[in-house]
Amino acid sequence: MTDAGPTIRAVPGLDFIAGCIVSTWLDTAAFLMIGHPPPRCPGETAESIEVGLIGMVDAMGLRSAPETVSTVGPRIVMRGAYVVLDYGHPKPFVQVPDPGDAWRSHVNRGYPALLIVALDPIPPGAGPDALAHYPDRVVSR
């Protein structure tokens, strides 16, 4: 019997990223959360969405919430009005909607930014309050 080694998931491309929901907020840290709504396109399943999100997690070296938070390096890039996340794919980046001046200032000063990849589906129309409470709800489970 041989050890098959770790499962390696592909880093999703632009088609997957285009369907993601990206949200930011500022609390004790700058938060950047990426998630995906429930399946809505032909061929898309809950399993295929989870594989895509876990591919991002693997590529960025993220850990699950109960584990020690790891430093993943300079993944947030800010140039002028644009903020993007280098999520580990060699070509596309995730464009971050304008996070606001306070969020930008926090990150530019080198203060912590916490990246969350939301594996639970984010319902369409979820507002800022629902998104900001997502980490508490998920970690409590």
Image (cartoon, rainbow, N blue to C red):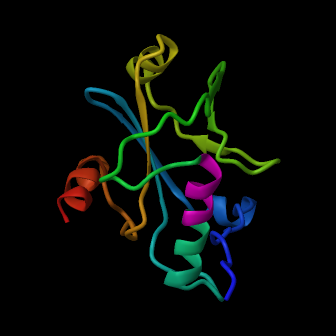
Residue extending farthest to the front is 1
Residue 55 falls within the magenta-colored stretch: yes
**As rendered, which of 48 and 104 lies closer to the eye?**
48
Quadrant into which the N terminus falls: bottom right
Q: Is residue 16 above or below residue 23?
A: below
Q: Which residue lies furthest to the left in this view?
A: 140
Image position of 127 (left or right of 88): left
Report the side of 53 relative to 5 (left or right): left
Residue 104, visible in the rendered structure: yes
> From which residue to which does the magenta span run?
54-60
Task: Tell me where residue 104 appears, x and y as whole percent.
Answer: 48, 20
**Main secondary structure found in the magenta portion:** helix
Q: Residue furthest right?
A: 91
Work out which residue is located at the far top of the displayed protein and give it.
109
Image vertical order of residue 77 relative to residue 2, above or below: above
Examine the image and state in which quarter residue 83 appears: top right
| Vertical arrangement, residue 37 with respect to residue 87, above or below | below
Q: Say above or below: 41 vs 115.
A: below
Q: x, y (%) of residue 109?
A: 47, 10
Picture coordinates of residue 49, whole percent (x, y): 55, 74
**Residue 130 visible to an observer of this rendering:** no
Residue sitting at 40 percent across and 70 percent down? Answer: 121
* Residue 69 in picture, x, y percent from top left: 39, 40
Residue at x 28% of width, y 52% of height: 135
45 inside magenta stretch: no
Q: Looking at the image, which residue is at 60% across and 47% down?
A: 60
Residue at 43% from the left image edge and 25% from the top image edge: 100
To which quarter of the image does residue 56 belong?
bottom right
Q: Which of 63 and 78 is in front in this view?
A: 63
Task: Name the one closer to the observer, 9 or 27.
Answer: 9
The C terminus - image quarter: bottom left
Query: Between 123 and 8, which is closer to the camera in this rendering?
Result: 8
